[in-house]
């Protein structure tokens, strides 16, 4: 069974604190107020246009989120397969992570 990371909108406050390594006050992610906006509907099937519209709204909400940087770091680490994380789609996050891995590997190879 493939591990599917929990979207921050679906995490409890203790899970957020443990996952993000935050001490003291943990900013509640904006997506917690409407998780399906960021993760997609659980039972309904949406059209491509509906999905694009939902994701556009989710991206806008992420822009002002106090937890955006924590979410972005977490998403790069877990490489989600679905959802909008820190204003980016799972595909965009995976592409960024692959590019980052290649960049760091070539940097490490050049530092001998």
Image (cartoon, rainbow, N blue to C red):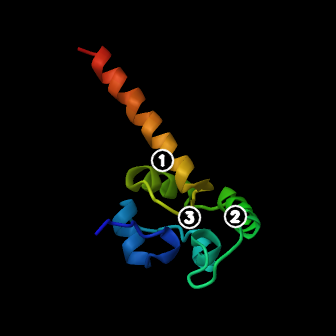
Determine the CA span between mark 2 and mark 1: 21 Å
**Disc number placed over residue 94 in the picture, else none:** 1
User: Dot 2: within a 10 Å radius of its alpha carbon, few (fewer than 14), some, or many (20 or more) residues?
Assistant: some
Residue 90 x/y as whole percent: 53, 55
Give the Cα separation between the discs numbered 2 and 3.
Answer: 13 Å
The x and y percentages for residue 111 are 28, 16
Mark 2 vs mark 3, foreground winner is 3
Q: 10 Å neighbourhood of mark 3: few (<14), some, or many (≥20)?
A: many
Using the numbered discs, state the Cα–Cα distance from disc 1 to disc 3 in whole angstroms.
12 Å
Write down the residue under mark 3: 83
Residue in the image at 58% along x and 76% along y:
35
Can residue 21 be seen at all in this image of the molecule?
A: yes
Q: Nearer the viewer, mark 2 or mark 1?
A: 1
Q: Which mark is residue 17?
A: none
Tell which circle, 2 or 3, labels the residue nearer the N-terminal end: 2
111 with respect to 72 (left or right): left
| Residue located 30% across and 23% down the image | 108
Q: Are marks 2 and 1 in contact (CB under 8 Å)?
A: no
Q: Residue at x 71, y 71 (%)?
A: 47
Q: Earlier in the sequence, mark 1 or mark 3?
A: 3
Residue 8, placed above or below residue 101? below
In the structure shown, which secondary structural element does the residue marked by tag 3 occupy? loop
Q: Identify residue for label 2.
A: 61
- Location of residue 59 with respect to 42 vertically, above or below: above
Q: Quadrant of residue 49?
A: bottom right
Pick whichever, 26 or 51, lies toward us: 51
Residue 5 image offset from top left, x and y in percent: 39, 66
Q: Name the secondary structure under disc 2.
A: helix
């Amino acid at each position: 069974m493939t591990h599917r990371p929990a979207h921050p909108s679906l995490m409890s406050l203790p899970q957020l604190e443990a996952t993000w390594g935050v001490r003291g006050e943990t900013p509640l992610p904006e997506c917690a107020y409407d998780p399906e906006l960021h993760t997609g509907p659980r039972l309904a099937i949406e059209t491509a246009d509906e999905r694009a519209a939902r994701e556009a709204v989710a991206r806008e909400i992420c822009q002002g989120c106090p937890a955006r940087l924590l979410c972005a770091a977490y998403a790069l680490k877990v490489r989600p397969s679905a959802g909008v994380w820190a204003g980016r789609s799972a595909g965009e996050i995976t592409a960024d992570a692959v590019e980052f891995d290649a960049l760091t590997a070539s940097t490490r190879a050049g530092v001998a």
